Amino acid sequence: MDLEVTPAGANSDTRSDARISHLALDIGGTLAKLVYFSGNEKLLNDDRVQSSAEVGGRSSSILHGRLHFAKFETGKIDECVAFINSKELGSQHPKELGNGKIVKATGGGAFKFADLFKEKLDVCLDKEDEMDCLVAGANFLLKAVHQEAFTYIGGQKEFVQINQDDLYPFLLVNIGSGVSMIKVDGNGKFERVSGTSLGGGTFWGLGKLLTKCNSFDELLELSQQGNNRVVDMLVGDIYGGGDYNKIGLSSTAIASSFGKTVSANKVLENYRTEDLARSLLRMISNNIGQLAYLTALRFGLRRIFFGGFFIRGQCYTMDTISVAVHYWSKGDAQAMFMRHEGFLGALGAFMSYNKQGPDNFIHLMKQDPKHEPEFDGTAPEEEDSEYASIDCFLDLA
Ligand SMILES: Nc1ncnc2c1ncn2[C@@H]1O[C@H](COP(=O)(O)OP(=O)(O)OP(=O)(O)O)[C@@H](O)[C@H]1O
Ligand SMILES: CC(C)(CO)[C@@H](O)C(=O)NCCC(=O)O
């Protein structure tokens, strides 16, 4: 198979030695995520390494290269297979003893597609637990990546300085097709404390049915031009235009998502798809924000990190989630988002190549300009810097 495939969000590496030395997968219900490392230039006593981490004396097993990110629709897993096939898994790639190559994989697809990967690529998927990987990926990003986490309040993005000594405990809310809520107490110390089936798959699935749009990005674009008040029943609609002050509800608060459609003498076709998309995005985001806060409250957590590809750096999504957390916690808890939102699981799977545990495996090069954020508040374009490759080295000791 010689199919050239350019994945959504992938950065093609034009270097001639850019064979994949390590590849890991997170194959979820909707999207398959890849993290791979290419370039096998050895760094021997290089200044940049010395200044990035203390690895002196053990430099013979250090690889310098770039960490790449890519995603495919799980429903088109053949494209993912073709992409991997179009790259070469180099000689450094881990092998089973006396056998073929192994690829670390997590998510339900690691089980569902194991035979397919064996058949098409002669690759054995080495399964890692999905929650373990999400937590390992989040911990790595929060500790190692400069400007990974940020708040989004009133249209303003602000990076959060992570104090490594004061990071735990936190609640990790991963919004994929479904939503997992994990209380994280340290490296490998966590409990999945809650979840909800009303997640990204619900937004995308209902949105597709209601608006007939063909892609997730199209649905997001529609939502940006919509007005949810056409569809949602507001407190003012019920209270004759006024607030319900006694219980702290303003006239503009949503009393019932989609509630207005009941009494309006309209059928689906009479609504603008923009308004339906807007209302749906708000309903799902608001509900997740509220559930996240209630879960945080249950365990006395004040920091909530949100990941998963539902977010897609989308302003309205992040704003709705932030407002929900702020509103229900009366300002006590804070929603934070992660730049590598959708790649937590794949990164965690990648780090499981390190037999000694997730620490000290991936070292970021200092001040990688490509890794500086360029966030303008819009949904990332497929090839933009949001998922830019990272200049780093792997310590294979
Ligand atoms: N290009 C896209 N195509 C489809 N869905 C997308 C896209 N971009 C973002 N999404 C959103 O991301 C969600 C999937 O997120 P993610 O990849 O984190 O979860 P998953 O791993 O597929 O799901 P799960 O973890 O529940 O198995 C979709 O349900 C949708 O809301
Ligand atoms: C089933 C998983 C973990 C698969 O990623 C995810 O889709 C999820 O957390 N769903 C929500 C399931 C629930 O807790 O109700």
Image (cartoon, grey):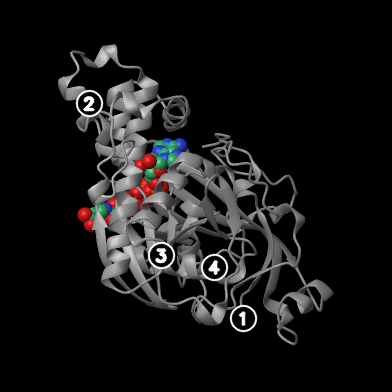
Cα–Cα span, label 2 and label 4: 42 Å
Mark 1 is surrounded, within 10 Å at the Cα level, by few (under 14), some (14 to 19) or many (20 or more) other residues, namely: some
* Vertical placement of residue 203 versus 145, above or below: above
Q: Earlier in the sequence, mark 1 or mark 3?
A: 3
Which quadrant contains ligand 2?
A: bottom left
Mark 2 is surrounded, within 10 Å at the Cα level, by few (under 14), some (14 to 19) or many (20 or more) other residues, namely: some
Cα–Cα span, label 4 and label 1: 23 Å
Q: Which of 158 and 68 is in front in this view?
A: 158
Q: Nearer the viewer, mark 4 or mark 1?
A: 4
Location of mark 1 (residue): 397
Q: Which of marks 2 and 4 is nearer the N terminus?
A: 4
Location of mark 4 (residue): 142
**Amino acid type at image mark 3:** Ala
Q: Earlier in the sequence, mark 4 or mark 3?
A: 4
**Amino acid type at image mark 4:** Leu
Cα–Cα span, label 4 and label 3: 18 Å
Q: Residue at x 58, y 64 (%)?
A: 160
Instruction: Let me know if residue 129 appears in the view.
Output: no
Q: In this view, does 187 lie to the left or right of 272?
A: right
Ligand 1 under 8 Å from disc 1 Cβ: no
Where residue 282 appears, as percent x and y from the top left, is 35, 38
